[in-house]
Image (cartoon, rainbow, N blue to C red):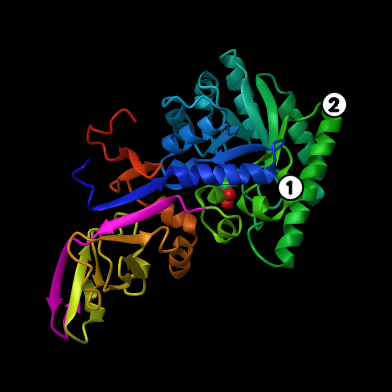
C-alpha cells in the first residue's frame, strides 16, 4: 500500500473526530444519548476506525444502512449497539439476532416477516419503529387521515412475538434548510412524531426506551427534538454550515501530489476536448486524481486546488485518473509538492456548492483506491487501502 501513498490519499484526523464528538456531547448534555451515523463507510471516512473511536469515547449507538455494514463492524470488535436504518431481507433475520443488531421496522408487512423469522429461529429481534412524519421515504405513514391506522399498525408490530421494540424514530426532511416554511415543516413533523408516540404508548401501556429524530440540522437548530438520543452524521465529520458555527473541525483532508510538470507555449489545448487553451506560456502540473478517485467531472475547468502557494486553477477536462492544474504563477510548487483537494485549507462546503451538491456526496465519493491515513496526536497511526490486494485483507 505504500506504493499508492504519495499519489492521492485521504487523511482522517481522529483528533478532529474526537473533538467533534466531545463538542456535540457537551452540547446535548449527559441525559441525551448519542448515536453516530456511520453508514456508507462512515461517509467515506472508514466505518471501522470511526466506530472504534466512538466506542472508546463512550458513544451509545451506531447506525448503518445495511446488514453487511453492520456485520463488518461486529467482525471488527465493535460491540456497542448498532441500528440498521434501511431494509434487511427476511432471510437475514437470524443473522441480525446472532450478531445482536437492531433493525428498523418500517411497515406492517416487514414487522410480520421479521416476527415470523425471529420465532422460527427462537430468538428475539431488537427493533426500532420508524415513523414517516413527512420525509415520505420509509416508515409507518401517520400524517393526517393515516394517524389512527398508523398508530394501530405500530401497536400491532410492537406486540408481535419475537420482536422487542426498544425504540421509535422518525427522520426530518428539511431541518437543515433555512426559512420559516422549513421550520414549520420540521415542527409539524416533530409534533406528529410525539403525538404518535403518546398514542402508541397509551395504547400499549408501555414506554419506548429510546425515542430519536434529531439529525444534523436538528442537533444544530432544534433543541426540543433531541428527546432520548440524537442521530447526527455530517456534524460528526465536521462539514456543512452548522459545523463551523458549533466549532467543529473537518475530519477528512483529501490530498494529492504534483506528479509531473510541463511548460506549454501559448495556444496549447489541455486534456480531452480541448476546453482549455493556454493564452501564454503555461506551467501545467498533473495530479494523479481523477473521477475514478472521486473527483466530480462537472467541476472541470472551474474549480481550484489548494497548493502551498495558494489556490491553483484546475485546467481542462478532469480525466478518469488525472487532472491538470495551472502552476504558472507558483514556481515554488514543484514535482512532489502536496496539494489539498478539500480539507482544512480548502473548504469542502465551497467545492460541494460549486459542484451543485452537498459535502456528503464528496466524501462518499472518495473511492476505494484512495488510501485512508489515520492521524492521531499529529502522527500517522494507521493506513488502510480498500483495494483487495492482500495487505488490507481481513478487514
Ligand atoms: C443519514 C441519516 C442520518 C444522518 O443525517 P445527517 O444529515 O448526516 O446528520 C440520520 N438519520 C437517518 C435515518 C439517516 O438516514
Provide residue 309's location: percent of width, then percent of height.
Answer: 30, 70
Tell whether position 157 is magenta. Answer: no
Compared with 199, 177 (above or below) is below
Provide residue 254's location: percent of width, then percent of height.
Answer: 35, 55
Residue appearing at x 13%, y 79% in the figure:
264
Q: Which mark is residue 205?
A: 2
Name the quarter where the N terminus is drawn: top left
Compared with 350, 92 (above or below) is above
- Residue 268 located left or right of residue 247: left
Mark 2 or mark 1, whichever is nearer to me: 1
Decide if residue 194 is in sight here.
Answer: yes
Provide residue 194's location: percent of width, then percent of height.
Answer: 79, 43
Residue appearing at x 28%, y 57% in the figure:
256
Compared with 152, 239 (above or below) is below
Nearest the viewer among 382 and 216 is 382
Quarter location, residue 376: top left
Say which residue label 1 marks.
225
Residue appearing at x 62%, y 38% in the figure:
34
Q: Which mark is residue 96?
A: none
> Is the C-beta of the residue carrying label 2 under 8 Å from the nearest atom of ligand 1?
no
Decide if residue 135 is in sight here.
Answer: no
Q: Secondary structure at mark 2?
A: loop
Quarter location, residue 37: top right
Compared with 353, 220 (above or below) is above
The residue range painted magenta reads 249-270
Mark 1 crowdedness (10 Å alpha carbons): few <14, some 14-19, many ≥20: many
As drawn, which residue projects farthest toward the front? 377
Name the quarter where the C terminus is drawn: top left
Amino acid at each position: 500500500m505504500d506504493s499508492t501513498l504519495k499519489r492521492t490519499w485521504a487523511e482522517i484526523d481522529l483528533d478532529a473526530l474526537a473533538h467533534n464528538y466531545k463538542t456535540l456531547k457537551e452540547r446535548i448534555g449527559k441525559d441525551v444519548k448519542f448515536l453516530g451515523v456511520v453508514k456508507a463507510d462512515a461517509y467515506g471516512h472508514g466505518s471501522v476506525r470511526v466506530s472504534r473511536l466512538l466506542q472508546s469515547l463512550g458513544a451509545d449507538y451506531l447506525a448503518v444502512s445495511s446488514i453487511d455494514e453492520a456485520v463488518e463492524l461486529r467482525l471488527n470488535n465493535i460491540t456497542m449497539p448498532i441500528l440498521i436504518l434501511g431494509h434487511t431481507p427476511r432471510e437475514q433475520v437470524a443473522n441480525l439476532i446472532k450478531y445482536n443488531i437492531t433493525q428498523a421496522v418500517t411497515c406492517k408487512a416487514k414487522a410480520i416477516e421479521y416476527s415470523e423469522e425471529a420465532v422460527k429461529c427462537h430468538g428475539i429481534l431488537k427493533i426500532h419503529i420508524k415513523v414517516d412524519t413527512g420525509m415520505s421515504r420509509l416508515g409507518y405513514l401517520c400524517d393526517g387521515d393515516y394517524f389512527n391506522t398508523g398508530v394501530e399498525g405500530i401497536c400491532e408490530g410492537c406486540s408481535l412475538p419475537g420482536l422487542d421494540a426498544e425504540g421509535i424514530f422518525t427522520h426530518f426532511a428539511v431541518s437543515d434548510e433555512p426559512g420559516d416554511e422549513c421550520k414549520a415543516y420540521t415542527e409539524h413533523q416533530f409534533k406528529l412524531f410525539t403525538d404518535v408516540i403518546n398514542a402508541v404508548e397509551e395504547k400499549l401501556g408501555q414506554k419506548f426506551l429510546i425515542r430519536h429524530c434529531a439529525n444534523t440540522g436538528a442537533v444544530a437548530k432544534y433543541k426540543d427534538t433531541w428527546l432520548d438520543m440524537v442521530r447526527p452524521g455530517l456534524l460528526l465529520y465536521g462539514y456543512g454550515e452548522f459545523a463551523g458555527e458549533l466549532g467543529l473541525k473537518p475530519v477528512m483532508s483529501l490530498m494529492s501530489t504534483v506528479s509531473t510538470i510541463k511548460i506549454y507555449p501559448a495556444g496549447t489545448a489541455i486534456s480531452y476536448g480541448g476546453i482549455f487553451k493556454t493564452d501564454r506560456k503555461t506551467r501545467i502540473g498533473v495530479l494523479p486524481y481523477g473521477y475514478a478517485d472521486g473527483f466530480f467531472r462537472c467541476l472541470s475547468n472551474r474549480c481550484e486546488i489548494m497548493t502551498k502557494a495558494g489556490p491553483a486553477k484546475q485546467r481542462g477536462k478532469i480525466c478518469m485518473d488525472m487532472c491538470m492544474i495551472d502552476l504558472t504563477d507558483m514556481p515554488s510548487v514543484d514535482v512532489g509538492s502536496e496539494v489539498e483537494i478539500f480539507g482544512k485549507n480548502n473548504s469542502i462546503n465551497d467545492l460541494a456548492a460549486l459542484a451543485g451538491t452537498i459535502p456528503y456526496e464528496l466524501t462518499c465519493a472518495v473511492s476505494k483506491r484512495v488510501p485512508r491515513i489515520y492521524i492521531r496526536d499529529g502522527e500517522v497511526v494507521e493506513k488502510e487501502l480498500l483495494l483487495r490486494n492482500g495487505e488490507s485483507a481481513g478487514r
